[in-house]
Image (cartoon, rainbow, N blue to C red):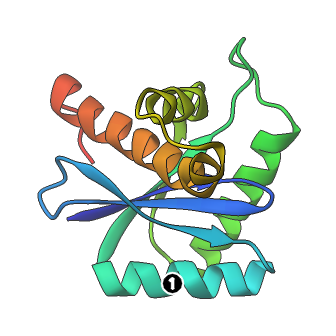
């Protein structure tokens, strides 16, 4: 079963995919947002190409766990994705995934320009890997 991980922002969508066994996550692309319909077209193609059966979307919570305006935007877009693509979507707490992605890139000594290009894809990878790890640690069903 392939699982898609998304880091949904206002300007970009970071995209990651699981291996066929659902053990590891790998970043595949960053979608530059144009319009809802064009964004859906790109996501639909990726889902088709990889035979995706589940989508995990990062949910940007505030540090105190509450949901803010960005969370509402993400949940609204996820409803739109489900309406158009018909693949189940689960939300995953994405707090600190972008921070972790930036820290990893700094440790790898990547330039600011390179970091900017891949941060969303890497954040999507962290989101998806966190979900995958939770399945095996807690035994939660997909």
Instruction: Look at the picture and state if 110 lies above or below 11.
Output: above
Where in the figure is residue 59, as x and y percent of width and height?
63, 40
Where on the picture, by quarter, is residue 112?
top right
Is there any visible trace of residue 85 in the rendered image? Answer: no
Secondary structure found at label 1: helix
Which quadrant of the figure contains the N terminus?
bottom left
What residue do we see at 65% from left, 52% from top?
113
Mark 1 = which residue? 44
Q: Could you say which is closer to the camera, residue 29 or residue 88?
A: 29
Where in the figure is residue 71, as x and y percent of width and height?
76, 41
Where in the figure is residue 14, as x and y percent of width and height?
56, 58
What residue do we see at 40% from left, 34% from top?
108
What residue do we see at 63% from left, 76% from top?
83
Q: In this rendering, would 61 be left or right of 82?
A: right
Q: In this rendering, would 71 be left or right of 20?
A: right
Where on the picture, by quarter, is residue 140?
top left
Q: Could you say which is closer to the camera, residue 114 or residue 51?
A: 114
| Count of marks, rendered view | 1
Instruction: Look at the picture and state if 28 lies above or below 125.
Output: below
| 10 Å crowding of disc 1: few (<14), some (14-19), many (20+) | some
């Amino acid at each position: 079963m392939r699982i898609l991980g998304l880091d949904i922002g206002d300007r970009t969508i970071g995209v990651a995919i699981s291996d066929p066994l659902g053990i590891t996550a790998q970043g595949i692309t960053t979608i530059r947002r144009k319009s809802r319909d064009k964004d859906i077209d790109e996501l639909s193609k990726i889902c088709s190409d990889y035979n995706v059966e589940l989508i995990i979307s990062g949910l940007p919570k505030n540090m105190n766990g509450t949901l803010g305006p960005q969370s509402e935007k993400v949940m609204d877009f996820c409803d739109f994705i489900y309406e158009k693509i018909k693949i189940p979507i689960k939300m995953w707490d994405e707090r600190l995934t972008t921070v972790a992605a930036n820290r990893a890139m700094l440790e790898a000594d990547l330039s600011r320009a390179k970091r900017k290009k891949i941060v969303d894809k890497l954040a999507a990878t962290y989101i998806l890997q966190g979900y995958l790890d939770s399945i095996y640690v807690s035994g939660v069903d997909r």
